[in-house]
Amino acid sequence: MNPLKDPLENRNGQLFIDGVSAQTLVAKFDTPLYVISERRIRNNYQRLQQALSRNYGKIKIFYAMKANSNLAVLKILESEGANVDAVSPGEVATALKSGFSADRILFTGTSVRTDELKFLVDSGVTINVDSQSQLERLLKITVPKTLSVRVNPEVGAGHHEHCITAGKQSKFGIWEQDAVKAYETAKKAGVQHFGIHMHIGSGILDAEPFLMALEKFLSVAKLVHDQAGVDFDFIDVGGGLGIPYKPEEKPLDVQYFSDKVLSLFKAKTREYGLGEPFLHVEPGRYLVADACVLLTAVNTVKVTPFRKFACVDAGFNTLVRPAMYGSYHHILAANKLNAPAEETYDVAGPICESGDLLAKDRKLPKLEEGDLLAVLNAGAYGFSMSSPYNTRSRAAEVMVKEGKFGLVRERERLEDLLRGQTETVEWMQ
Ligand SMILES: Cc1ncc(COP(=O)(O)O)c(C=O)c1O
């Protein structure tokens, strides 16, 4: 299957991203470089929005900004009418800075400190609590107008164990038997508007686990409604919609997903007497992953008696997913798209750890120093999970749009990495 999906294009063997040459970008901004397509983000958002609104009038999409919190990306989604799912005070502040008003931000944190709760209250965002402890500390600060509770619907799913965020082993959410108590506590304190929330995991390509969790989740909503006397303004089913990373994987059929999820949602809310609450969904990956490629240059080709390595300048400091989750990212030789894939390489980064491989056993054209590789689908959990490990700068990011480009994040400099450090200690007692 052809991995070159819109906005990627092969022009005479050279990779173009929404009409911009990869070679031109690296000549100007160097590597490693994240290249983000504005049009693809808009298309992804609109496709999902349309698929959901065909089935229900009260839909809100909350972009899970942990996937990619670049201000320019947030601005695009703000202009599309998205809301934001934020998980830290830093994310809330960034979303506010990029133009989202507080009433468009839902905070869903775990292990939240009391001073962070104070910040959230002052910011005016809606808080989705993850524990009874968090709820009680929040109620000591204020009685919020609206409150949501994250429920563990007992069914989790995801592309990797680390990305399953519900079920028996999960630290997230409140279990059924404690959920009623949480709502009763909030109601007694004077909270008047309520939401209920779940998020089962990430990278789900098939509606089935989602439907199983939704069924359980809605039964918890019924219990809360019946026993705590709570009506819901919104029911938030979380994110987790996957994208195909391997060329042979099929994309999630969002219309099918919408039809299935909404027919269950509508049937159960009717059956349980839950009225017509807003349905919230919280996609991160689905909106941004395939809107971005990571460009990285080959600096060394190294052949050992056992392996052949294409050594590049992006390692797990730049893109951690392969090292952290064993994730597959398709890789192309951006300047040799027409050359036959006749060699097998491990694509290795510059980090001093054996696990620093972006790919293993990858068929690619014969590579030389100076070749340019494009790591596809790098827009979600790419830059946002990158680090300065090995004292290497975080990459630059550029946006492309119909043949034009612009820098949206400068490459980190050594001064940035050293800021705040001192060579000598000022001892205190
Ligand atoms: C509460 C919550 N909502 C939404 C998401 C988005 O997940 P995804 O990027 O898989 O859609 C996450 C991801 O961890 C999350 O924790």
Image (cartoon, helix red, strand yellow):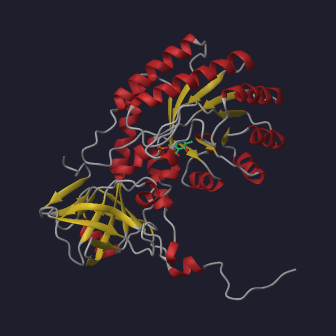
Quadrant where the C terminus sits is: bottom right
- Residue nearer the viewer, 237 or 7: 237
Asked if residue 20 shows in the view, the reply is no
**Between 281 and 155, the one nearer to me in the picture:** 155
186 on left or right of 38: right
Query: Where does residue 267 sit, x and y in percent of width and height?
Result: 49, 14
Q: Residue 218 lies in what quarter of the image?
A: top right
Q: Is 378 in front, or is 312?
A: 312
Q: State whether residue 398 is above or below residue 155.
A: below
Residue 308 at x, y percent in the picture: 25, 71
Residue at the farthest bottom position = 424
- Tell me which residue sits at (24%, 78%) in the image: 369
Using residue 374 as the reference point, say whether residue 75 is left or right of it. Answer: right
Image height check: is 383 above or below 59? below
Where residue 261 sits in the image (x, y, percent)?
A: 44, 25
Of 128 and 70, the residue lying toward us: 128
Q: Is residue 274 above or below residue 421?
A: above
Can you tell which quarter of the image residue 207 is in? top left
Apparent side of residue 359 relative to residue 202 in the rendered image (left or right): left
Image-based side of 320 in relation to 5, left or right:
right
**Residue 272 rendering spot, x and y as whole percentages:** 59, 13
Residue at the right extreme, as displayed: 429
Residue extending farthest to the front is: 305
Q: Examine the rendering and report whether any part of residue 385 can be seen.
A: yes
